[in-house]
Amino acid sequence: MSGGRAVTVLLAAALLSVAAPAPAADAAVDTPESATAEAAADLPARYRQWLEEVAPLISPEERAAFLALDQDYRRQAFIRRFWELRDPFPETPRNELRDRWQERVAAARERWDDLTDERARMLLLHGPPERVVAGRCGALLRPLEAWSWSGTDLTRTALTLAFVASGGDRQGRYRLWRPGEGLLSLLLLPPAGTLSDHAAAEAIRDQCLRGDELLGALAGAADWQQLEERGVGVPRPDAEWVAAFADRSTAVPEGAATLPAELSIDFPGRHQSRTVVATRVEVPRRSAGVGGSDGEPVHSFLLDGEVLRQGELFDAFRYRFDLPARQATDTLPLQVERYLRPGEYQLILRLEDLHGGGFFRREQELAVPVVAGPGAAGAARASADPVPPAAGNGSAAGQAPPEEAVVKLSSPPDQLHTGRVRVAAQVRGQAVARVRFELDGKPVLTKTRAPYSVELDLGREPRLRTLRAVAEAADGEALASDEIAFNAGPHRFSVRLVEPRGGGPLPEVLRAQAVVEVPDSDRLDRVEFFVDDERLATLYQPPFVQPLRRPAGDEPSFVRVVAHLAEGGSAEDLVYLHAPDNLDRMDVDLVELYTTVVDRRGRPVSGLAADDFRVREDGREQPLLRFEWVENLPVHAAVLIDTSTSMVERLRDAERAALRFFDELLTPRDRAAVITFNDQPQLKVRFTSDVEVLSGGLAGLRAEGETALYDSLIYSLYYFGGIRGKRLLVLLSDGEDVKSRYRFEEVLEFARRSGVAIYTIGMSLPTSADSARMALGRLASETGGRSFFTEGAAGLGDIYRAIEEELRAQYLLAYQSDQSDGAGFRRIEVEVQGRGLSARTLAGYYP
């Protein structure tokens, strides 16, 4: 058979196998672009052009939200956020996708009059084709092009697409050809007897220049519409961002009631090179609605603000206020702080009464002056009419304002730290007389001049240590402070109150400031400020600074801050106000015990009540404050697999068993990781819920090297640092430790401090390895896990299933320890009522 004949037969077979219905060749095709052009007729030209350029990227929800915007600065902010969410490498200064897209837009506009041609859309999506085959067949075929790529950003594999001229389009635009339409749809005047795709292929081969090449390209052409329906297309961010963006508007709904209020603006000081802008809205109490629950009436407000500079959105913020309705003041003061560089701005504020339904809106020019440091007597004030910068509102003429005190500790590398470590602090501020360093709350060094650095001895055993640096004035007043943690792990999530500091005389209005540390893998949702148990303000973006009214009287009270992650989880801090000297801070954490109850046959037992349990700490019974059956609580699980030389015959089975464990264990709320070890540990897959990613990390493991078991356990437990809730580490090894720097007792102490349940699997351990068996068993029993021993890999599946069954059938017992001092290990015992029942949980903890 000749080469041309082979192509003809293959093409005919491929076309006949496509089941997609074939539309008429010249049928009008409705596209999102045409709908956008009609709906966007009233937009300014540059925004119509932007919609045309991003048509292949933008979702219907995003398009509708953009068309609903009525202010250019909001449109500009939308466009910025649109590209930010699509930035493939947000850690770099460039947005690689946006830059590449703009280059393709320029190339498409150079070739075609507009971007509605399907060739332009495919060029934007895939880039310029590597090969183009044009149909040159005289009067036989419609104008035709076949484009080919060896791989694209979207397909990662070879791709061919065919385009055919639309017969009724006077502008000569092309549309995508779908293989299901058949070859007959490409012919202008079919030759006599050409009534099938097979005959059409013969005519193309015989009458077209490079007919065989054209037929080959058509035979390999993909149905792009079908690929998009299968999910091969442009990845789009979650549509939730569109709703969040629209919700942050400062527009007032048509016909909404007006809320009476007064606005004033002060410039009370400076934050580094920026001026503190304190915006205060006062609402008459009689005009505010009242709501709330649990018998505690409150006034609730939502304040949205926008700051424009040169017509573009420079800053946007949102605050929520909940004020007790029982206070006797005539007005409700709502105050926020922002940091702006001196200059001219436009401020837009919208206040919504969440219970009364009224709105207050103000739009005004804002002249931000240069001022002295925090609390300067010459701070400027603005009201409905802004106050311009002037002498007396800032520093004296020709003099720079005094520098605000700042201390910043250098962050330690993301790794375990033991032994001697040197840390430097960067210090600024003319008033700083000395810097005091504290390790775990105990003073270690005070320095009166630069360089401000300290050498610490963290000890041989790795554990969480906290270093604090305080910059002080000559009279001992604390001017600034910073804090870092060693061995906190890569998932540390914390919030710390920098102000107020507590103690001493306090002003009527306190300045509360929080510093939040969020892991790279998480996203902060909000920060809430409380005075005593009353939530007074909610902030959704930094700076996390909020003025709070001090409670009347001299009774002990406290300021509390709670930070919440978008995916769940919270952290909090607390500072007492005018409290006794021996009462400074309070530990609000409960001791949480994830407890498994089994019968005599080792089967998990459900259906028990809180009264069935007795918990003792160091021999003293502790009342339970929380009791819960946690069958479906989210889990963070890591599998630590020995890949030393002795595992060479069992490694493939170990991979398959671990993958089955992930496949059966993980729900969308769970996360798992893969860590391997021989001479040293290696993180193969970070915490994820994607089983395919975990499978890739398990594939192709190689057995080599010796066994550094204890070092690898230390590293794995460190990797859990900062994660809360139910956590477990599954260790699989077939040998004793022969190469670790750390000793077993040090590993056991670190494991006790970590709170991670360790499940150990000793595989084919020799009979002489009694010490290894004892070590694995003790690690499991001390941390609330379980130890297993198996000969060969055949039993791994049953072991993993037993672990999974336990994890989904546990009780959560929580209590507040009755011990207020002591830093040693506290032993825990859990007893369960019922014949033949036993409880398994961690053996104790370090406070």
Image (cartoon, helix red, strand yellow):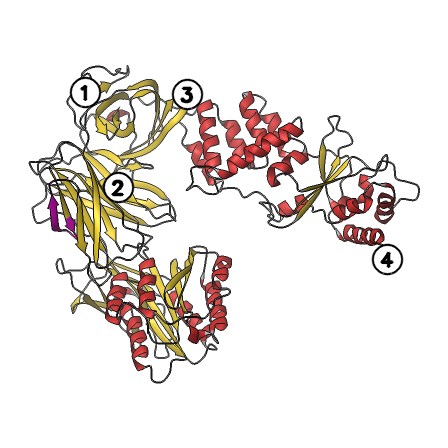
Q: Position of residue 539 (x, y in %)?
A: 31, 37
Residue named by callout 2: 515
Residue 744 lies in the magenta-colored region: no
Q: CA distance from mark 1 to mark 2?
A: 32 Å
Which residue occupies the foreground of this view, 242 or 515?
515
User: Which of pointers 2 and 4 indicates the residue nearer the eye?
Assistant: 4
Residue 25 against residue 273 in the figure, above or below: below
Which quadrant holds residue 267?
top left
Which residue occupies the foreground of this view, 282 or 840?
840
**Mark 2 Cα shell of 10 Å, populated few (<14), some (14-19), many (≥20):** some
Disc 1 or 2, which lies upstream in sequence?
1
Which residue occupies the foreground of this view, 625 or 767?
767
Residue named by callout 3: 311
Q: Amino acid at mark 2?
A: Val
**Mark 1 Cα shell of 10 Å, populated few (<14), some (14-19), many (≥20):** few
Q: Is residue 577 left or right of residue 261?
A: left
Q: Quadrant of the N terminus?
A: bottom right
Q: Check whether the beta carbons of the residues at disc 1 and disc 4 lie within 8 A of each other.
A: no
Q: Amino acid at mark 1?
A: Gln
The secondary structure that dominates the magenta segment is strand
User: Which of pointers 1 and 2 indicates the residue nearer the eye?
Assistant: 1
What SS does tag 4 mark? loop
Which span of residues is magenta-colored? 438-448
Residue 569 against residue 396 in the figure, above or below: below
Q: Which mark is residue 1?
A: 4
**Mark 3 Cα shell of 10 Å, populated few (<14), some (14-19), many (≥20):** few
**Mark 4 Cα shell of 10 Å, populated few (<14), some (14-19), many (≥20):** few
Q: Residue furthest front?
A: 451
Q: Is residue 810 left or right of residue 655?
A: left
